[in-house]
């Protein structure tokens, strides 16, 4: 799995974006039907890996990033003997994505780590290879792919790349506490056959909406998915946020299906955007106190048909 363009420099840096919950999450009629559709936002994890440490072992900072350390060890085992360091290695994970909120913080940590360690050791890390590694650790969001994707998070595999959307803002609030993704995915999901067919219909609608860049329909699907998720991960602020959305002329409400966040979706290209975002932030602050406005990421076609992110890391969010 050597990268011909990088034989290993001893130091590597990787990055991955987070998401604001999901546009859609549920279970399809098929086997291995658990899936989600990502909503990439301009929040980032950066990872740096250096082939030396004070102890001579692999270390991670901050120390609680144990999953990232486990992944680094797995990748080091793939390296040729001459690429390994007798001095150990230091992995530093720096993130502005809150943990346990449904914003893909853990997934972003792991994807950034895979990219950083792979570059340091000269091991190619295409998405399919990262998927296989992450499947051994935990359910994972589709943040290793640019754009909006449908992703089987429990089996960690891509279903489809749906595309990109015009810029949106998410006026987000946090109900407090945290949700462990691994524990949440162990909860039995009592979806009926009718529920599964409904999710298949929502996925088809969302696929068409993304390809048609139809933000109004995207908002409708996101809101319906959030409603259907209430019996799995209840949000006490969901109904009040629906009221705010209607009052400010928002597109819909998106949630962290396995988290504590809710947000009103707004079209950032709308002429009335400044008024709408101000009114939404004020109303949300009255409901929940602190409010954060996230910007979604838009992706364009780059070299070789690959999608490239049009927004730089750490840009596009502000706390109110």
Image (cartoon, rainbow, N blue to C red):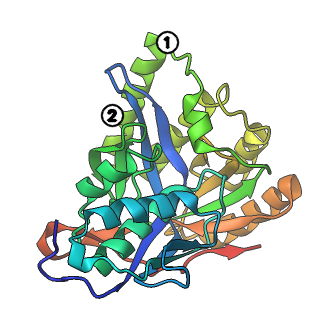
In terms of depth relative to the viewer, which is nearer, 269 or 57? 57
Residue on which disc 2 sits: 204
Whole-percent x, y for residue 90 in the image: 49, 79
Badge number at residue 128: none
Which residue is painted at 64% across and 63% down in the image?
Answer: 64
Q: Quadrant of residue 285?
A: bottom right
Q: Secondary structure at mark 2?
A: helix
Q: Secondary structure at mark 1?
A: loop
How far apart, in angstroms, are the residues tagged by discs 2 and 1? 19 Å
Circle 1: is it few (<14), some (14-19), or many (20+) Cα within 10 Å?
Answer: few
Q: Name which of mark 2 and mark 1 comes first in the sequence.
A: 1
- Residue 98 seen from this side: yes
Quadrant position of the C terminus in the picture: bottom right
Quadrant position of the N terminus in the picture: bottom left
Measured along the vertical axis of the image, is residue 88 above or below residue 99?
below
Whole-percent x, y for residue 314 in the image: 54, 80
Which residue is painted at 79% across and 38% down in the image?
Answer: 236
In terms of depth relative to the viewer, which is nearer, 248 or 34? 34
Q: Is residue 293 left or right of residue 54?
A: right
Which residue is painted at 31% across and 62% down in the image?
Answer: 77
- Residue 111 seen from this side: no
Q: Nearer the observer, disc 2 or disc 1?
A: 1
Badge number at residue 192: 1
């Amino acid at each position: 799995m050597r990268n011909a363009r990088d034989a290993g420099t001893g130091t590597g840096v990787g990055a991955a974006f987070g998401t604001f919950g999901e546009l859609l999450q549920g279970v399809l009629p098929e086997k291995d039907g658990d899936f989600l559709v990502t909503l990439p936002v301009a929040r980032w994890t950066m990872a740096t890996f250096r082939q030396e440490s004070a102890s001579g072992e692999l270390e991670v900072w901050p120390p609680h990033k144990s999953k990232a350390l486990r992944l680094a060890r797995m990748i080091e085992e793939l390296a040729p003997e001459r690429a390994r360091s007798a001095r150990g290695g230091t992995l530093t994970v720096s993130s502005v994505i809150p943990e346990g909120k449904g914003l893909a913080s853990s997934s972003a940590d792991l994807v950034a780590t895979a990219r950083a360690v792979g570059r340091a050791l000269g091991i190619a890390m295409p998405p399919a290879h990262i998927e296989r590694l992450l499947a051994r650790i935990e359910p994972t969001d589709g943040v290793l792919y640019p754009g909006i994707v449908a992703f089987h998070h429990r089996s960690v595999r891509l279903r489809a790349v749906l595309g990109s959307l015009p810029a949106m803002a998410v006026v987000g609030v946090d109900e407090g506490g945290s949700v462990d993704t691994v524990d949440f995915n162990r909860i039995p999901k009592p979806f009926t056959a009718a529920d599964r067919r409904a999710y298949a219909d929502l996925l088809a609608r969302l696929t068409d909406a993304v390809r048609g860049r139809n933000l109004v329909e995207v908002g409708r699907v996101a809101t319906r998915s959030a409603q259907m998720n209430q019996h799995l991960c209840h949000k006490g602020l969901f109904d009040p946020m629906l009221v705010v959305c209607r009052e400010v002329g928002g597109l819909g409400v998106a949630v962290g299906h396995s988290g504590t966040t809710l947000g009103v979706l707004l079209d950032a290209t709308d002429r009335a955007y400044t008024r709408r975002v101000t009114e939404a932030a004020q109303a949300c602050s009255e409901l929940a106190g602190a409010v954060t406005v996230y910007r979604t990421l838009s992706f364009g076609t780059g070299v070789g048909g690959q999608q490239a992110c049009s927004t730089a890391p750490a840009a596009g969010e502000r706390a109110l």
